[in-house]
Amino acid sequence: MYASEKRIYLASRSPRRRELLKQIGVNFEVLLCREDAARGADADERLNEGESPEGYVTRLARMKAEIGWLRVTQRGLPGSPVLAADTTVALDNVVIGKPTNREHAIEILTRLSGRAHQVHTAIAIRRRDAIESLLSTTTVEFRKLTEVEIRRYVATGECLDKAGAYAIQGRASLFISEICGSYSGVMGLPLFETTQLLQKFGYELL
């Protein structure tokens, strides 16, 4: 069976993850779950005490895949695999989340200025009784940024709702002096690891 004849569910609202799946020819359907805490979010994304950035992001990806599979069964949908992912930025092994507002974004980018940080993206696939996950870790180094540059970037609004307060595929690419690892992983879906997991579940791309 060709990959185009197969389908998976993507348990994510991220347009970047949709673009990356389309890039490698994956046929998918978006499976929406609640993310608004005020409406009772499906996944509790709080960091556990003593939890490492790698453990945190892997736990969330697996949790989201589990929740996605639960939605599939509850809604009586065809039993295609559910793919979920989560991305976090860590500086000195401390998780840096998404900015809560523009001033917080300025604070985050000021901390990242002139330093190397890690971007961890975990992906998980759940189907029936099986769940598998993989982790991608990429080191990104920012050149020294001026306060004016940071404020101008934040004013674009691109930093909002982004782990680490920046989008590598956008204007923040001007800040990056070096990257070691997966570019697509920093975007939110490491394609190498995604392909490996899809193949484990019988989804051949070529």
Image (cartoon, helix red, strand yellow):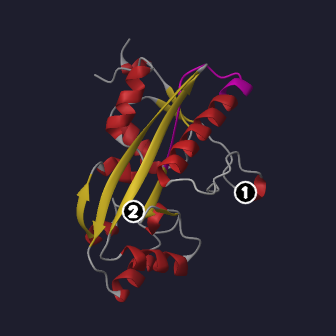
Q: Residues within 10 Å of mark 1 (few under 14, many from 20)?
A: few
Residue designated by label 2: 167
Instruction: Name the residue rendered at 36%, 16% in the picture.
Output: 2
Q: Quadrant of the C terminus?
A: top left
When the figure is inspected, residue 160 is found, relative to residue 180, above or below; the finding is: below
- How far apart are labels 1 and 2 at the CA level? 24 Å
When the figure is inspected, residue 138 is found, relative to residue 103, above or below; the finding is: above
Front residue of 3 and 196: 196
Residue 83 in the image, given as x and y percentages of width and height: 51, 34
Amino acid type at mark 1: Ala
Instruction: Name the residue rendered at 45%, 20% in the picture.
Output: 201
Residue designated by label 1: 37
**Marked residue nearer the N-terminal end (1 or 2):** 1
Residue 121 in the image, given as x and y percentages of width and height: 43, 48
Q: Farthest residue toward the top? A: 1
Range of magenta residues: 72-86
When the figure is inspected, residue 164 is found, relative to residue 17, above or below; the finding is: below
Amino acid type at mark 2: Ala
Front residue of 31 and 143: 143
Q: Is residue 23 visible?
A: no
Instruction: Name the residue rendered at 60%, 40% in the picture.
Output: 64
**Which of the 4 quarters of the picture holds residue 72?**
top right
**Which of the 4 quarters of the picture holds residue 113?**
bottom left
Q: Residues within 10 Å of mark 2 (few under 14, many from 20)?
A: some
Dot 1 falls on a residue whose secondary structure is: helix
